[in-house]
Amino acid sequence: MIQVNAMGDACPIPVVKTKNAIKEMNGAGVVETLVDNEIAVQNLTKMANQKGYGVKSEKLGENEYKVTMTIGDAAVEEIEAEEPVVCAVPAKGKNVVVVISTAQMGSGNDELGTTLMKGFIYALGQQEVLPKTILFYIGGATIPCEGSVSLEDLKSMEAQGVEILTCGTCLNFYGLSEKLAVGSVTNMYVIAEKMTQADLIVKP
Amino acid sequence: MEEKIVFCKGGGCTAKLGAGILSRVLEKLPKGPEDPNLLIGYDSKDDAAVYKVADDLAIVQTLDFFPPMVEDPYTFGKIAATNALSDIYAMGGTVKTALNIVCFPEKMDLNILGEIMRGGSEKVIEAGGTLAGGHSIADSDVKYGLSVTGTVHPDKIYSNNQGQAGDVLILTKKLGVGIVCTANRVQEASKEAMNAAIQSMTTLNKYAAEVCRDFTIHACTDVTGFSFLGHLHEMMDGRHSCIVYVDQVPVISEALDYADEFLLTAAGQRNRNHTGPFVQFEDISFAMQEVLFDPQTSGGLLIAVSKEEGELLLKRLKEIGLPASIVGEILEPSDIEIRVIHK
């Protein structure tokens, strides 16, 4: 395994350093790249996806991220063996989709429900196995938007590869189209597809 | 002049703050009493501010400065000035005066500063303007640009969002200068590609704007840091949708090769994060997507004009040597704001 320190480097240097490390390895293996910002994580992930490398990322601390790329088959096995202890990654094999359609968790008291929802999303991000996708619609559509108490938790999950999708019709309806702060906008086809293809739907 | 080695740290419009975080800050600023003479201010996302001083006269004000994106100080000065002047043209205005904005390390060779300002001043003269002063401060890094004042008739301002369904979209410069400069910074750009980028970045939008005066322009903006798709998104302004014919989009071809080598900027990824949700790519290569999100320093004009006038406008733009092209069409609003397709 090769470690690349790209802390303090502006794009495209982290990508250039990682490419050089992969070249140096000259075959299968694992390259770990340390970077200090989320955009660099995204640019590295983009490269790995295009090249067909295995990739996962984790936030080690404030302004410290690790992107692990696995090149070739041997490396994939090696990394999978240690997976449960290393960090939470999107669930392999099992397609877990979390559906959030209300701003509160449960009904009875809105204030309590809001607190519970914040707690739920935080706890979701702490799970050993993260969901593959989180869908937000109608009442839930405010949660991935500016001013939401759950933004940090959602951003951290997104950085670890969780797909976060919010219903575009709902954002338009509430006038929140410009306020979406994490993940991307989706439509009803994708929502229906994600739900029908899920192995498990979690609905708090 | 060993300072030259650290002169360029990756600048130009790639150094711009992301549109997302910026609007969050701007939204919270206190707003004073409204001045009816301020025709365009920053609650609109237009290129420059426009203030009416008489019924037939408005002033256009803009300011742009950034760190170097090329090694040669003289070329940097020309690019920075061309970029700053561009906003006046995007509003339909005429350049009148310019003020230098300079950040420069005290210990660096002053000849470098001289070269930067020589490049800038040449472009102000070419624009038909007068350099009227400036302000310089000692700073750890080099930054240069201009504050420019122009004039426009209040009825002839080019807004950036008044395009109409059925309009064609014309782009007057090639895309990809951000990626080429980034590749150049890690010594992976060819000389030809870099020359093409510099040639493009030092071409004043004045000439395109002059041709536009003979036509009824519905909307106009210059493509800069927020990328082609980012500025197109602002042009749609939630009220229209559009289709982009990707094969018609003028591109510095090497930019596609460098995008495939992942020589990408952080600003490009920020653009993708910000504008991506509004875009649907239909079988578009990764490299081309990156070029469409690439922050452009001193990019071309993006013009919305009726289909009838569009063909002739395009012909005239080509006649003056611009790599202009009809790159798309404005449509009625739809769920998908921007569709990028092969024609």
Image (spheres, coloured by chain):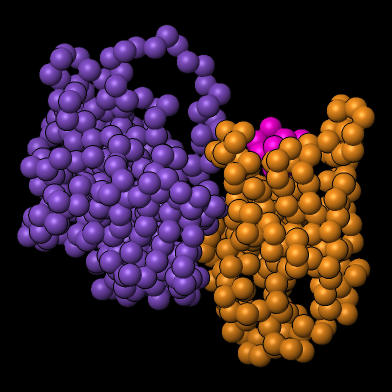
Q: Where is residue A179 in the image (x, y as percent from the top left)?
A: 59, 37
- Residue occupying the point 73% across, 52% down: A135
Residue A94 is drawn in which quadrant? bottom right
Segment colored magenta: A142-151
- Which chain has been coloured orange in this picture? A
Q: Position of residue B300 (x, y in %)?
A: 26, 52
Does the magenta stretch mainly form a helix, a strand or a loop? loop
- Which chain has been coloured purple in this picture? B
Q: Say if B127 sits above or below A52 in the image.
A: above
Q: Position of residue B307 (x, y in %)?
A: 19, 52
- Residue occupying the point 75% across, 65% down: A196
Q: Position of residue A90 (x, y in %)?
A: 79, 65
Q: Residue B45 colored magenta?
A: no
Q: Say if B175 sits above or below A136 in the image.
A: below
If the image is split into quadrants, where does the N terminus of chain A sit? bottom right
- Residue occupying the point 76% across, 85% down: A75
Residue A39 is drawn in which quadrant? bottom right
Q: Residue A149 colored magenta?
A: yes
Q: Nearer the viewer, residue A132 or A127?
A: A132
